[in-house]
Amino acid sequence: GVKQGSVCTACAAALIVASAPAALAETRLPPLDTDPTRCEKAYDGNTLGMANGLADKTLDLRFCDLKGANLAGKTLSAALMSEADFSQANMQEVVMTKAYAVGANFEGTNLQNAVLDRVEFAKANLKGVNFINAVITGINWNGADLTGATFEDALISVQDVKNLCLNPTLVGDSRVEVGCRN
């Protein structure tokens, strides 16, 4: 028979592998939601208000045009946001936990006072984003364009500071606000 301990070990190993940055290329997303109103659900957010990403239904905002949308205070946990347009959106005080926003456009978006935890911002356009006073932890910034982004008074995890400082598009005042040493 299989020992219970070995099953847990396998689970732990799978979890470690799944959370590795290299796993991004291997990410398998569910099929696009066919609900014609799926993009409008951004205005409701996760109605259960579960910041840990549990919800009755996946919030699928992939490829949605939410340019200039007022999403202030919404909970967008575990939202699928890749290739969506959130440029110039008001996302103040938004809670984005475990969100998948690879390649999304957030240019000029206001994320002031937002809680950003374990968000995949790889290859995202974050030009001119207002991250003032945001809580930032566990973000994938690989290939993201942070030109002109503002991080004043943001609470940024030590690892995120390291990762942000490696991003070549983080320059000038933005580097100072993040706490880069050079």
Image (spheres, rainbow, N blue to C red):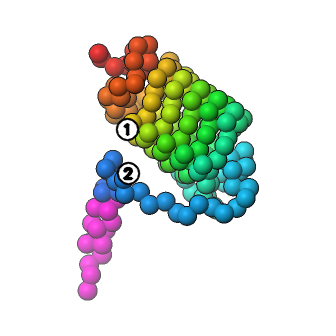
Q: What secondary structure prevails in the magenta region?
A: helix
Q: Residue at x 53, y 41 (%)?
A: 104
Instruction: Please state which amino acid type lies under the numbered disc 1.
Output: Asn
Tell me where residue 2 sits by quadrant: bottom left
| Residue 67 visible here | yes
Give x and y (percent) for residue 121.
Answer: 46, 40
Q: Residue at x 59, y 26 (%)?
A: 108
Residue closer to the observer: 129 or 78:
129
> Going by the image, does 93 lie left or right of 16?
right
Quarter of the image that includes the C terminus: top left
Residue 142 circle label? 1
Going from the N terminus, do you reach mark 2 or mark 1 first? 2
Check the image and report above or below for 149 versus 123: above
Q: Are marks 2 and 1 in contact (CB under 8 Å)?
A: yes
Range of residues picked out in magenta: 1-15
Q: Which residue is mark 2?
A: 24
